[in-house]
Amino acid sequence: MSTATPAKLMPRKRRGAELFLLILALIVGVGAYVAVGLGFNGEVPSDTITLAGGMAALAVIAHITVRYFAPYADPVLLPLIVSLNGLGLAMIHRIDLSLEAENSIFGPYAGNQLLWTLIGVIGFIGVLVIVRDHRRLQAFTYTFGLVALGLLLLPLVPGLGANINGARIWIQLGPMSFQPGEVAKLCLVVFFAGYLVVKRDALALAGRRVLGVDLPRGRDLGPILVAWLVSLGVLVFQRDLGSSLLFFGLFLVLLYVATERPGWLVVGASLFAAGAYFSYLTFGHVQERVHGWTDTFAMYNSGPYAGTYKYAQVVDGLFGMGYGGLIGRGLGQGDPTETSYSWSDFITASLGEELGLAGLMAILMIYALLVERGLRTALVCRDAFGKLVAVGLAVSFALQVFVVVGGVTRLIPLTGLTAPFLSYGGSSLVVNWAIVALLLRISDQARRPVPEVVPLAQDEATQVVKLR
C-alpha cells in the first residue's frame, strides 16, 4: 500500500509574468511617444530608439533587482508604474513641442523628467537592497515622526523656503528646488503605522454610543487632535490645501483600519468640517480657493481675478477635456498648452484632451489597479505593522489621485498636488518610486512560503532535554 507524501503547493514567484507585463508597459510608453511625433510633426521622433533603449534599460534593471532581492513580490506593481511613467514622459514631450513652437520661456521638461526617472529607479533599487525586512522600520517609529515634522517645517525656514504659485512648500537649493512634503508623506505613513500598532488596543475602546455609533473616549482624542492641528498648520502657514487634506486623511484612514471603529470616522469628519469652515472664515487664500471652485466661470469672466491663471487654468482645462470628447483629438493634435501648468498640475486635463474620456478612464483604471494591489498586499501581510504601512501607501496614492482629478474636474477645490508618475516634478517622481519599492518589499515578505518546522528525532529531542 502506497504512503506517498502529498505534494505541497509552493507560492509562485511570477517574475516571468512581471517581465511580460513590463514589455507591454514599455510598448504603451514608447508607442505614445511615437504617436506624439506622428501627430505633431507627421514623423517618428529621431530619438525614439534612444528613449526606448533608456526606458527598457531602466525597466530591466528594476526587474532584475526585484528578481534577486524580492523574488516573491507582487508581479503587477512594477509594470503599472512603468506604464504611467512612460505615458507621463510622452505627454510632457508633447507639451515641450508646443512650447518650443510658441517660443515659450517654459520648458523643455522631458529631458529633466527622464533624468528624474533615472534617479527614481536608483532610489527604488536602494530601498529594496537596504530594507531587507520592513518590520525593522518599526523600531524607528518616532525617528520617522521627527524627520517628517522637520521636513514639513523646512519650507518655513527664512532663506531656504521658497514661495511658488502662492504655496510655501518648496526649498530652494541654488538652481534646484525640492518639495520636502513628498518625503514627509512616506515618513508619516511609517510613523502612523508604528504608533497605531502599539496604541490600537487603547484607541479601539468604545466610549459613548450616539445614533448607533460607538464614539471614542474623550481621553483618547489626543492623537487625532494633534494630526488635525498639524494639517491645519500646513494649510495656514504653507497655504497647501492638498497636502493638508492628504496628511489628515492618511491618519484618519489608518486609525480606522487599526481600530475598526467607525466612530473615528465620525470624529474625523467632524474635525475636518470644523477646520474647513474656520479656515474659510479666517484666511483669504482659502476663501479664494472656495470662490474659484463655486464660481469658477463668473470669477474667470469678471471681477478682480478675471483672466488670471488661478481661474483660467480650471476653465481652460474643462474646455480642453470637452474639446477632447469621448476618444480625444489624438496625441500631438490637441492644444494642451492653452492651460497653465499643463505639464504638472493639469497634466490629467492635457491627457483628457488628447486621449479623450476613454483614455483618461483607462489611466484612472491603472491607478485603481495600483491601489488594489497595495490593499491586496495589506490583506496577505502577516504582521500588523506591515498591514498598516501597505494600507497607508496605497491610500496615499488613492487620496492624491482623487484630489488631483477632483480639482481639475471641479469636483473639489483646486489644490497643488501632482498626479503620481504622470506629472512633471522630481520630488514626487523619486518618492513615488521609493513608495512602490517599499510595497514590493512588504509583498515579498507576505508571499514568501512559511519556513517549515522540522520535528526533532527521538534521540535529538532526548539530547535537548538533557542539555536543559
Image (tube, helix red, strand yellow):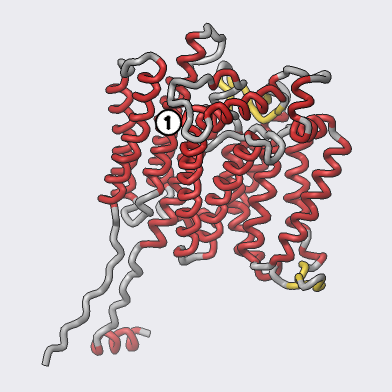
Any part of residue 426 in sight: no
Name the residue at 78% across, 31% down.
295
Dot 1 lies on which element?
helix
Q: Residues within 10 Å of mark 1 (few under 14, many from 20)?
A: many
- Expressed as whole percent of the image width and height from the top left, the position of residue 127 reads 43, 44
Tell which of 414 and 5 is nearer to you: 414
- Expressed as whole percent of the image width and height from the top left, the position of residue 97 reads 45, 15
- Specify the amino acid type for callout 1: Thr
In the image, residue 226 sits, relative to residue 84, either above or below, namely: below
In the image, residue 278 sits, relative to residue 422, either above or below, namely: below
Name the residue at 44% across, 56% down.
442
Which residue in the structure is indicated by mark 1? 117
Q: Quadrant of the C terminus?
A: bottom left
As drawn, the residue found furthest toward the bottom would be 1
Q: Quadrant of the N terminus?
A: bottom left
Name the residue at 66% across, 46% down.
247
> Is 199 positioned to the left or the right of 351 in the image?
right
- Expressed as whole percent of the image width and height from the top left, the position of residue 198 reads 62, 64
> Is 271 positioned to the left or the right of 145 in the image?
right
